[in-house]
Image (cartoon, coloured by chain):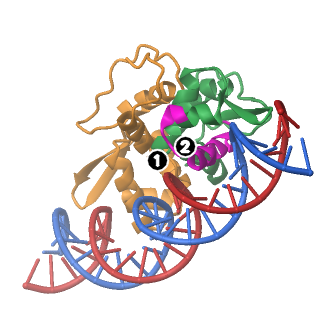
Chain colours: A orange, B green, C red, D blue
Amino acid sequence: MNADNGPLARDEAEEYASWFKALADATRLQLVSLLARRRVPMTVGEIVTGSGVGQSTVSHHLKILAEVGFVLVERRGTARFYRINETCVRCFPTAADVVMGNPAPAAPACDQGGRRGP
Amino acid sequence: MNADNGPLARDEAEEYASWFKALADATRLQLVSLLARRRVPMTVGEIVTGSGVGQSTVSHHLKILAEVGFVLVERRGTARFYRINETCVRCFPTAADVVMGNPAPAAPACDQGGRRGP
DNA sequence: AGCATTCATCGATTATCGTCGATTATCGAT
DNA sequence: ATCGATAATCGACGATAATCGATGAATGCT
């Protein structure tokens, strides 16, 4: 797949762009890397104190990250637990390879918990 | 390096974000993938006709891609030849791994033709 | 029922970005 | 010196986006 050498189709390009766009912000990168380092689910409050950004701003960014599937949410009581999506952790670098024209190293498909995404 | 588990430092986050930002646009993705597929240098005119975007727009995007080092320029006569930066092709997916908290697979440093970048 | 906690959402503000047409700069050829 | 081709730059416009404070909704506890 994708071995021709025209430009990337517009739809594909927009799909990939939406993934990169989700990481195209320093604050958002700090959030995903925080969730990726501690692999355990974290509440919004923990993420706020652990990142030094305002609560509403954190909530906003987490929503964006969840929409592209980089993070997953689970409600427990009044708290929301966010955690990194391990599937994206594995698959996203492969997407980077595709864009860069690298031969995809036998990628075992890219399913994740229901969401569309890398 | 980077084995602690605080969030990514702000400076690192901004550096990585600038790379992702360069790819956070469908048109720009089409340009890099076009240059990555044909690995041979292309003039702006060829890129324009090969991508169906206005000349000034293409020029604008190529500048952005060159600033982060994804593409390299060379002047020959009145033409400008743009080509993909092979170093970025190899290193960028590794950067994606770093952000995602993956163990960097023995990356052999990330120098490229003088420019700062992935 | 009432209150406290946790977080999403709203509204507003400010900054950044993508695109286009027109203009300008650079170079080669005549 | 002039002309033609190539591509960068400029100025403008509309659209997105990031941040913040305040408000609102859901839940658990007493």
Q: Which residues are magenta?
A: B49-69
Q: Which of the 4 image quadrants contains residue D15?
A: bottom left
Label 2 Cα crowd, 10 Å radius (few <14 / some 14-19 / many 20+): many
* Residue at numbered disc 2: B20
Q: Is the same chain shared between marks 2 and 1?
A: no
Identify the subunit bearing mark 1.
A
Above or below for A108 versus D6: above
Q: Which of the 4 image quadrants contains residue A44?
A: bottom left
User: Does residue D5 appear left or right of residue A92 in this picture?
Assistant: right
The residue positioned 57% from the left and 33% from the top of the image is B47
Above or below for D1 versus B84: below
Residues marked 2 and 1 touching at CB (< 8 Å) = yes
Label 2 residue SS: helix
Is residue A118 among the parts visible in the rendering?
no
Q: Position of residue A5 (x, y in %)?
A: 48, 20
The amino acid at mark 1 is Lys
Res B35 label: none
Label 1 Cα crowd, 10 Å radius (few <14 / some 14-19 / many 20+): many
The residue positioned 50% from the left and 56% from the top of the image is A50
Identify the subunit bearing mark 2.
B
The residue positioned 49% from the left and 45% from the top of the image is B24
Magenta stretch encompasses residue A74? no
The quadrant of the rendering that contains the N terminus of chain A is top left
Q: Position of residue A93 (x, y in %)?
A: 48, 29
Magenta stretch encompasses residue B53? yes
Majority SS type along the magenta span: helix
Label 1 residue SS: helix
Q: Position of residue A8 (x, y in %)?
A: 44, 30
The residue positioned 74% from the left and 40% from the top of the image is B116
Res A21 label: 1
Camera-side residue of B89 and B72: B72
The amino acid at mark 2 is Phe
